[in-house]
Image (spheres, rainbow, N blue to C red):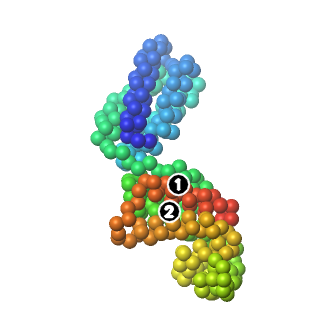
């Protein structure tokens, strides 16, 4: 969500909270049991958690700055799900949000600049990744929210190559070695220039001995990726290298979107690389 859209959503949320506050003050008695008011509070708190809070992190807010409002909207959510709630408690929670809402949130967003929006492809990768992969991918996500695009590329590739290496481990290093020998013996066709014969027996050896570009060739010959997927993943690997070394090749938002889309489609979403969780 971009800055201007976030400002509109915050203004709308503030207006809805103010209207809810007026309705609460108009209730006679000590308890709130009207479902219409409960539903309004539920919608407000749901919008905060589902739409606004994640965007606040993207715009540059820290967890410390947001934690206070996370707790307040959590209280509002719990109240809205109760059969009935004490009116004074309801009003106190709403007032606690409104009292600092403008200065803490709205004004600060006005002062901010647009942050890079994390592509949906990365979020989908994280949701299906293994615990080990998520360590890399979550750091890549955090880097993107701060605008560190090159760092995100490096971390994203680390997770992808780890998935491919671990799949080779499961399929067997002997099979991997055999495929490399078969390729190196080719004297014509697409694989005739591949001249490496591997003798890998451990995951550590695979990581330290086999270059990523060679690994992609073996995976293609093995049938785990096709030639087009190989080319696209090779482009991702080139972007990883240009991100890791000084140079004039900048990484753009369009590059990032394409990079994580290809990783999602050809590695993490590729049934040939599926892993047990």
- Tell which of 236 and 128 is nearer to you: 236
The quarter holding residue 248 reads bottom left
Secondary structure of the residue carrying tag 1 is: helix
The quarter holding residue 89 reads top left
Residue identified by numbered label 2:
156
Q: Position of residue 231 (x, y in %)?
A: 57, 67
149, above or below 93, in the image: below
Q: Position of residue 25 (x, y in %)?
A: 42, 16
Label 1: how many Cα within 10 Å (few below 14, some 14–19, many 20+): many
Q: Are marks 2 and 1 in contact (CB under 8 Å)?
A: yes
Q: Mark number for residue 265?
A: none
Q: Is residue 222 left or right of residue 25?
A: right
Label 2: how many Cα within 10 Å (few below 14, some 14–19, many 20+): many
Q: Position of residue 49 (x, y in %)?
A: 49, 39
218, above or below 149, in the image: below
Secondary structure of the residue carrying tag 2 is: helix
Residue identified by numbered label 1:
122
Q: Residue at 38% of width from left, 53% of height from top? A: 146
- Tell which of 65 and 188 is nearer to you: 188
Q: Is residue 79 visible?
A: no
How far is the residue under mark 2 from the one under mark 1? 9 Å
Q: Is residue 76 visible?
A: yes
Q: Residue at 63% of width from left, 68% of height from top? A: 227
Which quadrant, please, contains the C terminus? Answer: bottom right
């Amino acid at each position: 969500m971009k800055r201007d859209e976030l400002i509109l959503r915050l203004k709308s949320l503030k207006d809805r909270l103010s209207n809810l506050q007026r309705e609460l003050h108009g209730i006679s008695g000590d308890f709130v049991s009207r479902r219409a008011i409960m539903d309004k509070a539920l919608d407000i708190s749901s919008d905060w958690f589902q739409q606004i809070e994640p965007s606040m992190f993207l715009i540059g807010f820290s967890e410390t700055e947001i934690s206070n409002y996370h707790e307040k909207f959590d209280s509002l959510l719990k109240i809205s799900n109760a059969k009935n709630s004490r009116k004074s408690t309801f009003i106190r929670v709403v007032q606690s949000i409104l009292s600092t809402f403008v200065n803490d949130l709205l004004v600060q967003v006005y002062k901010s600049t647009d942050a890079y929006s994390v592509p949906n492809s990365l979020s989908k990768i994280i949701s299906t990744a293994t615990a080990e992969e998520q360590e890399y991918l979550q750091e890549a996500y955090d880097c993107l929210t701060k605008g560190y695009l090159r760092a995100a590329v490096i971390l994203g590739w680390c997770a992808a190559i780890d998935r491919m290496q671990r799949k080779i481990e499961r399929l067997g290093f002997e099979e991997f070695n055999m495929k490399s020998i078969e390729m190196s013996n080719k004297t014509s066709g697409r694989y005739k220039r591949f001249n490496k014969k591997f003798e890998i027996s451990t995951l550590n050896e695979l990581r330290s001995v086999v270059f990523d570009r060679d690994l992609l060739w073996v995976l293609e010959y093995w049938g785990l990726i096709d030639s087009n997927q190989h080319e696209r993943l090779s482009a991702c690997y080139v972007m990883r290298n240009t991100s890791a070394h000084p140079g004039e090749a900048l990484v753009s938002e369009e590059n990032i979107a394409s990079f994580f889309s290809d990783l999602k489609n050809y590695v993490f979403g590729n049934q040939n690389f599926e892993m047990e969780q």
